[in-house]
Image (cartoon, helix red, strand yellow):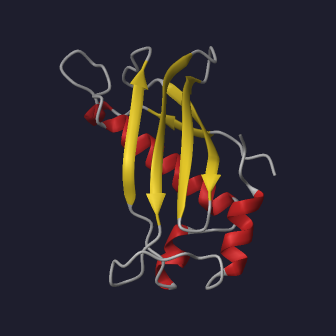
Amino acid sequence: MEISPYLRRANYYETDQMSIVHHSNYFRYFEEARIEFMHAIGCDVKDMEKLGIIIPNVDAYAKYIKTIVFYKLMQIETKLVKFNGAKMVFEYIIKFADTNEVAATGHTTHCFVNNEHKPMSIKHTFPDIYNRLKENIKN
C-alpha cells in the first residue's frame, strides 16, 4: 500500500525570533506523520492503546538540511523500515511541498510495552496488528 505524505504548515508558535522553526519541533512533525501513517495502515495508535499496547520512543535522530520558516508547507514521507514484533524503526523525509527540496531527514525507534510498561511482543498476542505492520515495511 502506498502511503501519501503527511502535509503540514509550519505554525508561528513553532518558530524562533528569526522566524525559523525551532529544531525541537521536527520530532513533533515526525510523531504526527508516524501517527497518520499508523492510522492509514489500520494500526490506529489510540485503538492500540485501548488494547493495552503502548509504543514508547527509545531513540530519535534528525538531520537538519534547510531551514523551515513560518507558514511553509511541508510534506513528510514516513517509512517503516524495521519491525520484528517487539521493536520498529521509522524513517522520515521532510520536503518543501512546492519545490520537493529536502529540509530534514530522521528516524525514530520504538518498542512495545503493556500498561505496566513491561516490554512485549505483539506477534502472537495481536497477530492482526503484527501482520499489518509487517506488510508495510519498506527498505
Q: Nearer the viewer, residue 13 or 32?
A: 32
- The picture quadrant where one finds residue 19 is top left
Q: Nearer the viewer, residue 88 or 96?
A: 88
- The picture quadrant where one finds residue 130 is bottom right
Tell me the quadrant of the picture where the C terminus can be found. top right
Q: Please, is residue 116 above or below residue 129 in the view?
A: below
In the current view of this chain or complex, which residue is farthest to the left?
A: 17
- Tell me: 56 left or right of 20: right
- Tell me: 107 left or right of 129: left
Q: Which residue does the image show at 44% across and 41% down from the upper left?
A: 29
- Tell me: 109 left or right of 137: left
Expressed as whole percent of the image width and height from the top left, the position of residue 92 reads: 55, 36
Q: How many marks?
A: 0
Expressed as whole percent of the image width and height from the top left, the position of residue 138 reads: 72, 44
Q: Nearer the viewer, residue 52 or 76?
A: 52
- The picture quadrant where one finds residue 70 is top left
Q: Please, is residue 103 above or below residue 24 in the view?
A: above
Q: Which residue does the image show at 18% across and 19% down from the upper left?
A: 17
- Tell me: 66 left or right of 37: left
Q: Please, is residue 99 above or below residue 1 in the view?
A: above
Expressed as whole percent of the image width and height from the top left, the position of residue 86 reads: 53, 67
Q: Which residue does the image show at 58% across and 38% down from the upper left?
A: 7
Expressed as whole percent of the image width and height from the top left, the position of residue 116 reads: 33, 84
